[in-house]
Image: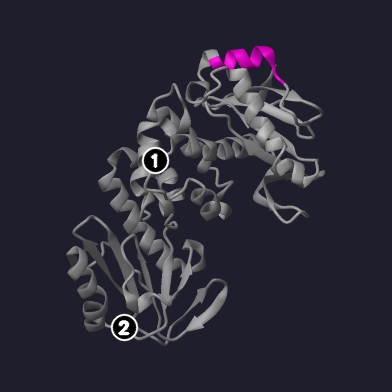
């Protein structure tokens, strides 16, 4: 599976002749490529070009035209000649040995320039996303990745981000509103990458990823500071740590396949089997103390009603079994003593 978009940094000298010879020509020979001025200028002593391939792939390249200037690179002061490449096409061989950086590790002006370019590209190629600017920005490393651009957009466009009976507009509005709070901004690359960059569409797996966003919203709305991928003493990570002035609580999330897409077509069985897999695996290795959230958002109204009414055990306590709706409401039930104050967010039955 290809990775989400990342910059490559070259510390060699660059000019327009070298760009033509070592970047454009190999790509043009393989894909048919054109070299042009970008829409925006990176500033701070940098010049830039964009390369567009005949197959729809792209690349951005910015190089320093004033080597006397310095900037910050991943927290360190850097001076001298350098350049940045970002693209979802084949990387030219001259850049193969360069280091990779995510958006918030490169100089701010380079990151801002590239993301402005990409957001405009995304709005042009997928105009239905233009209204959801924050969602587009948050998932940009995936939405324009080499293999994941088509599948990630199809998931949001055709599968309502995992809501089984909601419109695309309702679903994207739900996540746009949550992401705008900035709660997950510091963990953007970690969380966006979970959606995956596979060329094969897997709505069930992608919906499971959105279950983590649903739980993050619950925890944030309840007033907790949310840290994804919380490391534990057993050497692995659980999905979240929810913290307040009283301390922190570890959280693990699972999301059952909807009954219509399982061998077991009973919604209660679906919840039990999925939760059992999680509790006998990662949570068992952890040794207890974490809260298990079972996200039934993929269930239709009648399927959720059966689970809500029976309230099956999930082989782990404490646990919260819930379903999200795109209007921002959550309903569910709890098993065991949950050390989180969720009553103002989740309507517990």
> Which quadrant holds the N terminus?
bottom left
Percent coordinates x, y for residue 219 in the rendering: 66, 37
Picture disc at residue 175: none
Predominant SS along the magenta part? helix
Magenta-drawn segment = 303-312
Judged from this view, the residue extending furthest toward the front is 263
Percent coordinates x, y for residue 297 in the rendering: 54, 27
Left or right position of 302 against 114: right
Residue 40: in sight, yes or no?
A: no
Residue 179: in sight, yes or no?
A: yes
Q: Nearer the viewer, residue 326 or 290?
A: 290
Left or right position of 266 against 23: right
Say if mark 1 contacts mark 2, CB within 8 Å: no
The residue at 42%/75% (across/down) is 9
Question: What residue is shown with label 2?
Answer: 14
The residue at 42%/71% (across/down) is 8
1 or 2: tag closer to the N-terminus? 2
Q: CA distance from mark 1 to mark 2?
A: 39 Å
Element marked by disc 2 = loop
Q: Say if 220 sits above or below 4 in the image.
A: above
| Location of residue 220 (image quadrant) | top right
Question: What residue is shown with label 1?
Answer: 201
């Amino acid at each position: 599976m290809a990775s989400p978009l990342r910059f490559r940094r070259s510390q060699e000298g660059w000019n327009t002749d070298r760009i033509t010879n070592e970047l454009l020509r190999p790509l043009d020979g393989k894909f048919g490529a054109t070299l042009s001025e970008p829409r925006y200028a990176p500033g701070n002593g940098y010049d830039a070009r964009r390369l567009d391939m005949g197959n729809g792939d792209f690349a951005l390249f910015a190089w320093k035209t004033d080597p006397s200037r310095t900037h910050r690179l991943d927290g360190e002061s850097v001076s001298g000649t350098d350049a940045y490449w970002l693209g979802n096409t084949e990387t030219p061989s001259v850049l193969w040995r360069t280091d990779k950086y995510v958006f918030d590790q490169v100089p701010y002006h380079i990151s801002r320039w590239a993301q402005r370019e990409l957001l405009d590209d995304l709005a042009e190629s997928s105009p239905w996303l233009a209204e959801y600017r924050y969602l587009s920005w948050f998932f940009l490393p995936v939405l324009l990745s080499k293999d994941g651009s088509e599948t990630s957009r199809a998931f949001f466009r055709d599968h309502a981000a995992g809501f089984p009976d909601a419109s695309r507009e309702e679903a994207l509005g739900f996540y746009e509103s949550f992401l705008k709070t900035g709660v997950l901004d510091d963990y953007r690359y970690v969380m966006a990458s979970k959606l995956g960059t596979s060329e094969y569409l897997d709505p069930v797996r992608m919906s499971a990823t959105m279950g983590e966003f649903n739980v993050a919203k619950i925890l944030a709305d309840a007033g907790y500071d949310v840290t994804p991928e919380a490391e534990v003493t057993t050497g692995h990570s659980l999905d979240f740590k929810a913290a307040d002035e009283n301390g922190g609580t570890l959280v693990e999330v699972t999301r059952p396949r909807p009954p219509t897409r399982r061998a077991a077509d009973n919604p209660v069985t679906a919840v039990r089997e999925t939760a059992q897999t999680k509790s006998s695996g990662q949570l068992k290795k952890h040794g207890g103390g974490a809260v298990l959230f079972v996200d039934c958002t993929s269930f239709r109204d009648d399927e959720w009603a059966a689970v809500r009414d029976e309230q099956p055990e999930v082989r782990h306590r404490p646990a919260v079994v819930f379903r999200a709706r795109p209007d921002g409401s959550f309903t569910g039930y709890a098993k065991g003593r949950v050390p989180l104050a969720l009553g103002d967010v989740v309507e517990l039955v």
